[in-house]
Amino acid sequence: MDACAVNGFFSSAQIEKYSAAVPKRRSVRAFKGDPDIGQISALHYAAARVALPGVRIALGEAPPGGLYRRLPLVETIHGSQRYAAVIADERIPRAAIHAGISGEAFILEAVALGVGTCWVAAFKRGGVNIPLNEGEKVKAVIALGVPANEGGPRKRKRLSEICASDPSSWPFWAYNAAEYVRVAPSAVNLQPWRLSFAGNTLTLSSARAGANLDMGIALLHMTLGARDQRHMMRWGEGKEIASLIAEDKL
Ligand SMILES: Cc1cc2nc3c(=O)[nH]c(=O)nc-3n(C[C@H](O)[C@H](O)[C@H](O)COP(=O)(O)O)c2cc1C
C-alpha cells in the first residue's frame, strides 16, 4: 500500500466548501443558459487548482451538432453549451482515479458557485474541441450551466447494502464517511462501492472492475465525510481501492 496523492492536497477551506456542497449537488440535465462570465473565470481557476497528477480539466463550448448522446430513461442534457473535459494522462499511475477525485472536486466548486453540473460519460468524442497531448484521454465531460429546475430526489442504496458490517456500530467519522460515499454520483447510478471498517481503518472497495472515475469520486466523498477526524489515505490493491486510516488527534 502506498501513500495517496489526495493526502494534504486540498486546503481545509476547500474541504469545508466541498462538504457543504455535497448535499446540494444533483445531476442537472436541463439548463436555462450558460454560467455567467464571473462563474466561468472562477471555474477556470478551480480547474487548475483541483488537478491531481496526470489530470487536466479544460473548459470548452459544445459544437453546433451537440456534445451529448441520447440515453434511454434519462433526459438528454440541453440548454447550455459550456462544459469541462476531464482529461487523464494514462501514462501516470492511477490517473483515472485521480480524474474522478479532481472532477468531483471541480463539480463541488461549481455547485458552491451556483452552477449546475452533470458528469457525462456518454458524449460524442468528436464533439470535444480541446487539443490533447500525447498520452491524454478525455475520461468524461461535465455539463455546466444555470439549472432550469431543482432536480428530483436522490435514488440510492441503503447504507446496509454498501457496508460490510452495521455502520451504526462504527465511530461517527466512519459512519459519516460512508454516508458521504452513499450520496456520491456514479455512472448509471450503479453505486459500485463497498465499505468495511476494522480497527482505525475504513476501506473503500470496488464491486465493479474498471469503475475508476466512480471510485475516485467515492474516495473524495469518503475523505470529506471523515473531515473531523485526522486521517491519511493509502492506496490498496485489487478490488481494495484505498483505506482511510484514522490518526490520533493532535
Ligand atoms: C462517471 C459518470 C458518468 C456519468 N455519465 C452520465 C451520462 O452520460 N449521462 C447522464 O445523463 N448522466 C450521467 N451521469 C450521472 C449519473 O446518472 C448520476 O450521477 C446518478 O444517476 C445519480 O444521480 P445524482 O447525480 O443526481 O445524485 C454520470 C455520472 C458519473 C459519475
Image: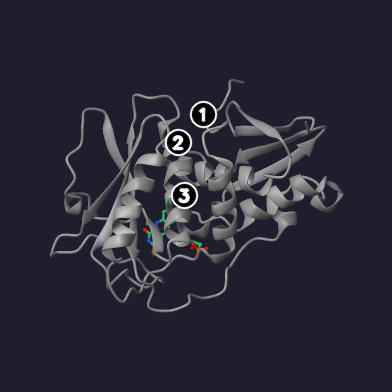
| Vertical order, 234 against 227 (above or below) | above
Which residue type does callout 3 highlight? Glu
Q: Which mark, by number, is residue 98?
A: 2
Could you tell me which secondary element the residue under label 1 belongs to? loop
Query: Residue pushed farthest left?
Result: 64
Is the CB–ligand 1 distance for label 1 below 8 Å? no
Discs 2, 1 touching: Cβ within 8 Å? yes
Which residue does the image show at 46% across and 39% down from the upper left?
210
Q: Is residue 182 left or right of residue 61?
A: right
Closer-to-camera residue (249/149): 249
Judge the density around disc 2: few (<14), some (14-19), many (≥20) Cα neighbours within 10 Å. Answer: many
Closer-to-camera residue (199/155): 199
Could you tell me which secondary element the residue under label 3 belongs to? helix
Earlier sequence position, callout 3 versus callout 2: 2
Earlier sequence position, callout 1 versus callout 3: 1
**Rendered-image quadrant of the C terminus:** top right
Judge the density around disc 1: few (<14), some (14-19), many (≥20) Cα neighbours within 10 Å. Answer: some
Q: Which residue is mark 3?
A: 104
Which residue type does callout 1 highlight? Ala
Closer-to-camera residue (138/8): 8
Residue 68 visible in image: no
Is the CB–ligand 1 distance for label 3 below 8 Å? yes
For discs 2 and 1, the disc positioned in front in the rendered view:
1
Which residue type does callout 2 highlight? His
